[in-house]
Each structure stands twice: as C-alpha cells, then as structure tokens.
Amino acid sequence: MGMRITTGMAMNTYRYNLQLSTGNMTNSRNKVLTKRQFDSFAENPSGAIQAWRVRRAMVNNNSYLNNNSDTYSRFRIAWETMGMINTKLIDEASRKADLYAENDPTAGGRPATGKVMNDTADSIVQAMNSAKFGSHFVFSGDDEMNAPFSWSVDGKTLLYRGVNVNAGGVKAPNEAPKWASSPISDVTGLPEDMPSQGKNAVEDAWIAYYKNQKEIADFDADPDPNKDPADRPAALTKPSDLQDPFANSPKDKYEVPEDAYGKKESTDEAERLWATYYLDQGDKNRLDMLANEYENVDLGMGLQEDADGKLVDGTAFNRALPGIDMLGYGVDKNGDPNNVVMIMKRLGEIYGAADPETGKLDPDDARAAELTKEADRLMDKLKEGRQYTAGKYVEIDTKAHFLTENQDRLEMQEDYLAEERVNIENVDLADAITEFSWDYYCYSAALKVGTQLLSQSLIDYMS
C-alpha cells in the first residue's frame, strides 16, 4: 500500500528545501562579496586559530615598523648634527686657526683665533641642544624632555644634565700632583714644573704648600739679626698629611661619602680638600653612568630576557644617544679636557687674552711660557677630539644603516604575513563565483518547482 502525500507534507518539505537553498545562496553570495572563507570561529576552528596567530604577528610587526621608523628618524637627526659639527664647525675652526698662524708670524692673530674657538664651542653646544625629534631632545640620553648641555653661571664650565664634563681630574689630597716630583729650581726654590695656578682646590693647596715652604726657607736664610721671629710664616700642613675626615662615612651609589656633601666650602682645610676630591670623583661616576645610558626598543629582533630578568644582548635595540658620549668627558693625565667643546673653550680663553699687537699670552714671561705650552698641547688634543667625534659619527651611521636594513626586512615580513592571511582567510574568487552560481540556480529551481507542485487552493479553484 502506497503512502499518501498530503498537501501539508508537500508544503513543509518545499519550505524546508527553499530555506536550505536560500541559506546556501546567501552564504555563497557573502563569500563572493567579502572574499572570506569563514565569519566565525565555529565555521572553521583550525583556520580561525591560524588566522588569529597571523593577525597577531601582523599587529606586532606593525608596531616594530613604527618603532623602527621613529628610531631611524632620531638617528638621522643625530647623524646630520654630528656631520655638521665635524665638517662645518670643528674642521672650519681648525682651518682658520692654521690660517691665522701662517699669515701672522708675529702671532698677533691669536685674539682672532681665540674668538673663533670660543664661538665654535658655543655653536657646537647649540647644535647639540637643537637636535630634536618632535619635542624630544635627541642627545639627552633617556631624559629626552630637557636640553642636554648648559653653561655654568660664569660661562666657563660646560654641564651635561647638570654635571661638570671636566670631572675626574681632582686627585686625592694625599696624592701629590705630577709636577711635585720635578726637581727644585735653583732660581725659584720651587718645583720646576709647578704651575703658577692650579686647576682645582686640591692642586691650589699643593701650590700654596710649596710656596709656604719657600717663604719659610727664605726667612730662615735671611742673615738680618734684627728680624722679628714673630714674622716667620706659619707652616702649612702638607696636603698628604691631612687625614680623610669622611673615611668612615657611608657612600652613595656614586661612591661619594654622604657626609662630604655641603663641605666643599668648609673652613676646615681637610674637609674642604677631601670633599672637593670626593665630589669630583662622584661627578665622574655620574658621567660614566650617563654616557652608558640605554633606552631599549623592540624592533622585532626577538626581545627576550634571561633567568635574571635582564635583556639578552642582541634582542633589543638601544636608541639612546647620550650627548656626553658623543663629545667626550673627563680629563687626561695632564689635566686637559677630553671634551672637544671644553678644549676649544680653553683655547679661546688662552688666545683671546693675548696681546693684540705682540700675541704674547701673558705679561709675565713664566706664565706666558706655561700658557704657550698648554695651548700647543691643546691644539694637538683638538685633533684627537676631532677623530673621536668622527668615530661617533661613523658609529651613528652604522646603526642608521642597520635601521634601514631592518625597515626593509620588516616591510618584507609584512608582505609575507599579508599573503599568508589571504591564503588562510580568503576564498578563491573563481571557485566562490562558481559556487554562488550553482546555489543561485538551485534557489531558482526550488522556486519554480514550488509553483508546479503546489496545487491551487479550493477558494482559488471555485473562483
């Protein structure tokens, strides 16, 4: 016995098939319009997970690109600035100094040389301070909101973030300066190499001590029987015999005894000299730290930390550019500055005070000889300073070249990731159109079949 198919059964089956055809057509049409294989995790869990990983990599890569671009801009500004300092300022100042020396055999051009040196020193500082990326000072290390360099109130001392760039030259009071070991002059009764004035309070104390010894010796050697013993100069304590009053004081992170602060102007000689020494060494330690500041940025090199929480070398890029490292700091064994600006500033001071007619550096012959020797030494030191800044210029150029190559690598990686995302998420358009055409055909067929299979209602028939 056959099964009777009612009108209700036919209608339900027709509606189900029509809805199915409509849904298939809608889905295939959306694939053509959006070009996506799936719109939810449930449609394709494996593909969705792969797509999420790729998209996360794309977001990270975009962040690396932005960081790299910003960092390159900073290094480009630093590169341009250091190039100008080397070729337009230092080289030009040296050329003019040589020109004045060659064309003025009487050395009357020394005041002009002094002005050139002084003005160039100021220009270098202005160039370093004007190097900015947006509102950030390029050469301020990790403190990018304040100008890196400034001058002291008297305009003679260059400061980097408030610290004297000539720090480190003060020896401990119990350590005699180099000139103290030179022979005693038969003419002056003083060490032959002793300068007329010291470069700091400790050296001044040693000079005062030797002059005091000479005065006492002269008084004792005077045969005048009528001299008053009360006029004999009081003997000064030898600096090396001054005990360190801060030996037991705890030290801070700069190795400065905590009790030494505020004692640089003390009336107690031992406190004053030892505080001068410790504070100077503390400034040198500060400069060492400032010169080695770092500002690590993630440029897609596999940022990673070791077991101690420290960054693994080579996984991050240091974009800090401490200006003090660019120009040098501290003093050499002769007490001359290592900083190219202070070398030029001191040359400007020496030559600027020369007699405009004779070129003599000081009316006193002994002092003039000292200054001439110092100036010659500083001119040679200026060449070394030029080589140092040129080396830093090359170092910046090398890092800028790396950033350029890294930018190309990240852009290439961006293209690969975009291609991989397309392969995972997007459909083949030809297949999608074919599928849509078939589903549309099925939908149209379902509509047509419905008009043929479903009979007219009784009311339509009776009318």
Image (cartoon, rainbow, N blue to C red):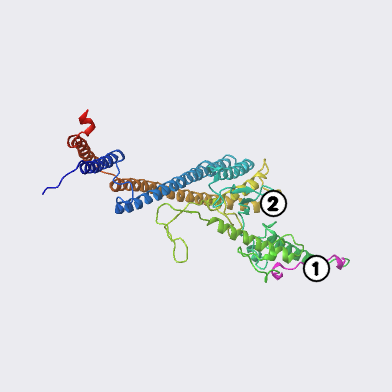
* Label at residue 220: 1
Task: Give the residue at the far right of this rendering.
Answer: 226
Q: Nearer the viewer, residue 199 or 7?
A: 7
The local secondary structure at tag 2 comes to helix
Q: Per the image, is 311 magenta? A: no
Q: Tell me where residue 221 appears, x and y as whole percent.
A: 79, 67
Q: Tell me where residue 436 appears, x and y as whole percent.
A: 23, 39
Task: Give the residue at the far front of this rendering.
Answer: 462
* Label at residue 422: none
Instruction: State which quadrant residue 355 falls in.
Output: top right
In terms of sequence position, does the residue under pointer 2 or pointer 1 come before the other? Answer: 1
Q: Is residue 205 left or right of residue 395?
A: right
- At x 46%, y 47%, the residue is 71
Q: Nearer the viewer, residue 242 or 245?
A: 245
- At x 14%, y 47%, the residue is 3
Q: Nearer the viewer, residue 360 or 6?
A: 6
Q: Tell me where residue 319 appears, x and y as whole percent.
A: 48, 51
Q: Is residue 220 above or below residue 111?
A: below
Q: Per the image, is 238 magenta? A: yes
Q: Which residues are magenta?
A: 227-244
- Mark 2: give few (<14), some (14-19) or many (20+) Cα within 10 Å: few
- At x 47%, y 44%, the residue is 73
The local secondary structure at tag 1 comes to helix
- Mark 1: give few (<14), some (14-19) or many (20+) Cα within 10 Å: few
Quick one: quadrant of the C terminus? top left
Does the CB distance between marks 2 and 1 fall below 8 Å? no
Q: Which residue is mark 2?
A: 365
Is residue 184 in view?
no
Which is the main secondary structure of the residues drawn in magenta? Answer: loop
**Residue kind at label 1, given as amino acid type:** Asp
